[in-house]
Image (spheres, rainbow, N blue to C red):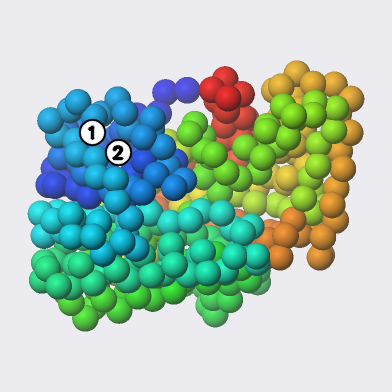
Amino acid sequence: MSWGLTYRVRCRLGKVLVTGGAGFIGSHLVDVLMERGEEVCVFDNLSTGSLENVRHWLDSPNFTFIRGDLLNPIDLERLDIERYSLIFHFAANPEVKIGSAEPNTHFQQNIVATHNLLELIRKAGTQPTLIFSSTSTVCGEALKIPTPEDYAPLKPISTYGASKLACEALITAYAHTYGFKAVIYRLANIVGPRSRHGVIYDFVQKLKRNPEELEILGDGTQTKSYLHIKDCVDAILLGLENSTEQVEIFNVGSEDQIDVKTIAQTVIDEMKLKNVKLVFTGGEGGRGWKGDVKNMLLDITKLKALGWRPKLNSKQAVREAVKSLIKTG
């Protein structure tokens, strides 16, 4: 599958900072920015990201890597924040499931870390554009499917979703108060190479340990939108270059859905396994864990109006992600 960007780049972006740039989504964004010839600095504590994801750029004169944590004041001092005209804030703890057992993790790594970055911007007195990776989980169990950007009230059912919604609120308030621009992306389930969390990764790892049986959290009917990482990055850059509001929100996802049981069968097929016993854990209302949204599909009309649409649907994106994960381990 050949992607290529679906739009023409209008202008150079200037000096770019990517927090969490060694992570799954961040590193794929960095690849595209570097290929465009941008000057990029990645700031990452490598807690969930990996230096391997950006190692191929380390010798480039346009690339800088800073190992640092947004929760560490000493590390923050190393960020010369006024240098950057564009800040992609992708640093966060991405694991939704841990929230019920470790809610403080999402509070610290998502909310406090975001506040610390916003304070850096405020104190610098500059007016960069801040791009934030939010999530469909801010909507909770939406009554309107597909769910548009202006859906309300937002009632997240996980601490992860709550933390991201809090970040959205902080970013919106700081942008209006201190005069900078923000673009917020509510992402569906993003899949593809380098991902080390989520249902596909979990299934592959479980089947490697035991190819005869697969535990599936919940009842397998959880139905959600999945988007390939390359389509995601394409959407992020297109939305950025066409945003007009001081704070702009875009949904990013596919136009269809796939259920967890189908994902399990896709993994089994691609791993060429036979007679795998599926064991469902059940869970409250068939959810995989407390806070698991059972039905999610975002309305992407706003981005489509700008000329973007995903090249792969949910099933195709999942299959491509499975193949890449099996190949790379």
Q: Locate residue 121, reporting x and y percent.
A: 19, 67
Q: Report helix, strand or loop for mark 2.
A: helix
| Residue 143 quadrant | bottom right
Nearer to us in this view, 303 or 202: 202
Q: What residue type is labelled 1?
A: Met
Q: Locate residue 73, reporting x and y percent.
A: 26, 64
Q: Which amino acid does label 2 sit on?
A: Val
**Residue matched to label 1:** 34
- Name which residue lies at 29% across and 68% down: 116
Specify the label residue 111 is tagged with: none
Specify the label residue 30 is tagged with: 2
Q: Looking at the image, can residue 38 be seen? A: no
Q: In this view, does 290 lie above or below 207?
A: below
Most distant residue in the front direction: 74
Q: How crowded is mark 1: few (under 14 residues within 10 Å), some or many (20 or more)?
A: some
Say which quadrant the C terminus sits in. top right
> Do tag 1 and tag 2 residues touch (Cβ < 8 Å)?
yes
Q: Looking at the image, can residue 24 be seen? A: yes
Q: How crowded is mark 2: few (under 14 residues within 10 Å), some or many (20 or more)?
A: many
Q: Locate residue 304, reporting x and y percent.
A: 42, 50
Nearer to us in this view, 72 or 51: 72
| Residue 274 quadrant | top right
Q: Report helix, strand or loop for mark 1.
A: helix
* Disc 1/disc 2 C-alpha distance (Å): 6 Å
Nearer to us in this view, 244 or 22: 22
| Residue 89 quadrant | bottom left
Q: Locate residue 83, reporting x and y percent.
A: 10, 54
265 to the left or right of 96: right
- Name which residue lies at 71% across and 65% down: 290
- Name which residue lies at 36% across and 35% down: 51
- Name which residue lies at 60% across and 49% down: 225
Nearer to us in this view, 106 or 28: 106
